[in-house]
Image (cartoon, rainbow, N blue to C red):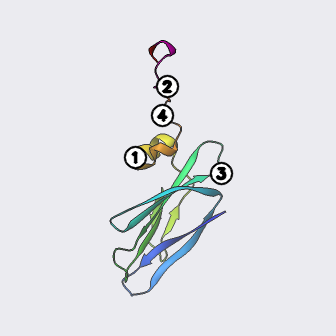
Amino acid sequence: MVLVLVGQYVETGKFSGYWAEFEGEKISSFERQDVVYTLYKCTAYRFDAYRVHTSDETDPLAPVYELHPYTAEQPSHPPSRDYTEPYDEETLANQYPYFIQHLGLLEKRRIDPSPKNR
């Protein structure tokens, strides 16, 4: 099981959020401009399904933690989000090209010389 923090500080100055729990495993992560992107493979689906957690701590007094993809955000505290549709490989590659190396989308090519060229 994976447990990630989702939430942020709101106008009242209090943190509004929750722990999102799902079946899966961490595949990779990278950091860009103090934002950490973490790729998870979701194991509860019958296809190659993925989620990305972002941890934006550029402002230490107002961090933002999100789990992608999500839809139908409702105005509530904490926000109500629907996470039932994860990324498939193609959509993930379009949204987060850095993670393409971890997907089965690329073909393998043999680049060694043939025996007669050695």
As shown in the figure, which amino acid type bears the numbered disc 4?
Answer: Leu
Disc 1 designates what residue? 97
Quickly name the residue at label 4.
106
Q: What residue is at 63 percent from the left and 56 percent from the top?
A: 24
The residue carrying pointer 4 sits among few (fewer than 14), some (14 to 19) or many (20 or more) residues within 10 Å by Cα, namely few
Q: How far apart are marks 4 and 2 (CA)?
A: 13 Å
Q: Nearer the viewer, mark 3 or mark 2?
A: 2
**Dot 2: what SS?**
loop
Q: How far apart are marks 3 and 2 (CA)?
A: 31 Å
Name the residue located 59 percent from the left edge and 43 percent from the top edge.
Answer: 48
Residue type of the residue flagged with mark 1: Pro
Instruction: Note whether 42 is above or below 11 in the view shown.
Output: above
Disc with the residue nearer the chain's start (3 vs 4)? 3
Secondary-structure class at tag 4: loop
Mark 1 packing: few (<14 Cα in 10 Å), some, or many (20+)? few
| Cβ–Cβ under 8 Å for marks 3 and 2 | no
What numbered label is drawn on residue 43?
A: 3
Q: Please state the horizontal and vertical placement of residue 19, each as a whole percent of the image.
A: 58, 72
Q: Quadrant of residue 75?
A: bottom left
Q: At numbered mark 1, what does the secondary structure look like: helix, strand or loop? A: helix
